[in-house]
Image (tube, helix red, strand yellow):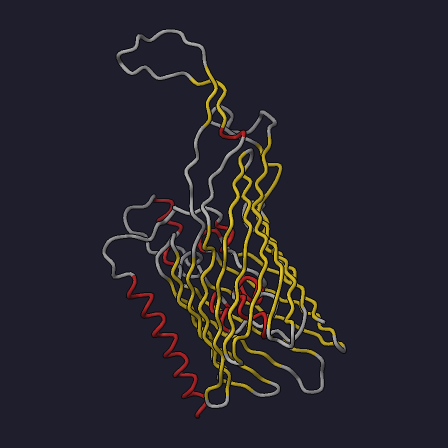
Amino acid sequence: MRMFKEGAVALGLLAVMAGSGAAQTQIEEDNSGVGTTSAEFLLLGAGARGMALGSGFGAIVRDVEALYYNPAGLPLMEGPEASFTMMPYFADTDYVWAGVASPIMNGQFGIGLSIANFGFGDQPVTSEGDPQGESGLQYDVSETVVGLSFAHAFIDRFTGGVTLKYINSSLGQTDASGFGVDVGTNFHTEWNGRPIALSFVIQNLGTTLSYEGAGLNLENVFPEPDGDTPVGAVDPFPAELNAHEFSMPIVFRVGAAYDVLASDANRLTLLGQFNEINNNAASWGFGGEYGWTPVDLPVTAALRGSYDFQPDNDFDGDTSDAMDAAYDTDNSDSLDGLTLGGGLTYSLGDYTAGFDYAWRHFGVLGSRNVFSISLGW
């Protein structure tokens, strides 16, 4: 009975966080900044476990995926770990993430390195005059971020960390680069003998991205007559388009997690989070993870799931008939933000090997599968 009461309290905490997100939508003027950021791939996540648990994962992350979700989790790792994640995305694009991290000096500090890439290649160049791309010209898209993370355990219950990022975005014959930083904190203690944790994370603070390159060069430009200048034959001259600067998607996350069930063999963790982002309205989410560790076997199994509210499903204003029809189906906004998954970890002496899987739904786009492998030592 006491466990159910504690679970109710934990769910109440999630409701409060959700209420905060709902209160944000009461602002009458739309100040969400939709469509004003670049490098959106920075929001795709890392690791099948982290994706399955949503952004609230930053409160409990104690493995290499802390490099993405909350660098403050690095000193809390049990040992060095490396991980690789693959998510085949839509329209023949791919997203991959890899990282290696380790606690040092008996958990007083933690360090790590991560890299992620999103893109596709060998796509035909189309234009108004050549909609089928029969010219034979092709282009590639490759967006990459490299992060270096460092964290410190200030006291036994509070850790903090930073990740320094270099971002490069190559779109065809244009290119942009910038720098960013993630800052995260983690407070963890016990309530009624069970772990409870809070996290505060800011992601992607940094420079703007402005594209340059041959793709912005124009070889034949004819000046428009201004009404006072006689219209006549003129020689074309080269010009270069100036691209506007766009900020990166800056995110502020508040997460909470509580183990409503904690024993040697069984664990059930509930998570909640509130997200504020500079290119969308505020959002909220919740999730849970059940872990089973049999006493006589070197295996740990886990089941996970989460739901993150997608504020872009609440359209304000007229939309096209096709868009309206798409969002009337059960496979769009009703499932958008839902993620399910699980994982297995096998221990052999001082080594552990893990495999994790997640199924993510992206609304009208459909669903994607995520696969991760990890090795600890």
Q: Quadrant of the C terminus?
A: bottom right
Q: Give me the residue at 61% from left, 75% from top.
A: 107
Q: Answer above or below: position of 192 versus 67.
A: below
Of 172 and 293, nearer the camera is 172
Q: Answer above or below: position of 305 versus 259.
A: above
Where residue 81 sits: x, y (%)?
67, 68
Q: Residue furthest bottom?
A: 1
Q: Give me the residue at 43% from left, 87% from top.
A: 4
Where residue 41 sits: x, y (%)?
51, 51
Q: Answer above or below: position of 279 versus 131.
A: below
Q: Answer above or below: position of 335 versus 292.
A: above
Q: Give me the residue at 52% from left, 63% from top.
A: 162
**Count of numbered circles in the view:** 0
Where residue 358 sits: x, y (%)?
57, 64
Q: Quadrant of the N terminus?
A: bottom left
Q: Residue furthest left?
A: 28
Tell me: 61 left or right of 315. Answer: right
Where residue 117 sits: x, y (%)?
59, 50
